[in-house]
Amino acid sequence: MEAGLISDRTVVVSTVHSLQVLDEELPATDHDFGVDLIVTPDEVISCPSPHRPAGLVWEHLDAAKITSIPVLAARAPADGH
């Protein structure tokens, strides 16, 4: 979203095995994002109101992580956060 390549209207989908589907809250941080749909071999599950960060949460990335991923290094703020 930060790069302008997707928007809050972009549908995010993930495929998982049926055993990976849980009907409970999962721990999440501010940089995690939710999906709109989960697709298993047996069903398509709609996920209402998924969390979407507006962009990268630079405070959650250390210098080693940023430098190890070229696209992050290219976009890193000058002050490191």
Image: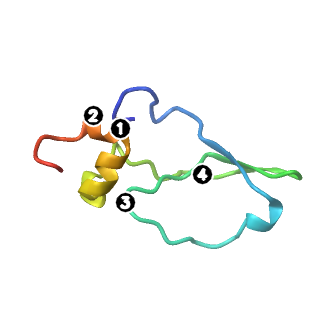
22 up-or-down from 80: above or below? below
Number of residues whose C-alpha sits closer than 10 Å to that of mark 2, classed few (under 14), some (14–19) or many (20 or more): few
Front: mark 4 or 3: 3
Q: Are marks 2 and 3 in contact (CB under 8 Å)?
A: no
For the N terminus, the image quarter is top left
Count the numbered circles shown. Answer: 4
As drawn, the label of residue 58 is: none
Between the C-alphas of marks 1 and 4, the distance is 33 Å
Give the residue pinned by disc 1: 70
Of discs 2 and 3, which sits in the foreground? Answer: 2
The amino acid pointed to by label 3 is: Asp
In the figure, is residue 21 to the left or right of 77?
right
Q: Is residue 36 left or right of residue 67?
A: right
Name the N-terminal-most of marks 4 and 2.
Answer: 4
- In primary-sequence order, the first of circles 2 and 3 is 3
Percent x, y for residue 32? 45, 57
- Residue 33 horizontal/vertical position (percent): 48, 52
Q: Quadrant of residue 22?
A: bottom right
In the picture of the structure, the residue carrying the numbered disc 3 is 30
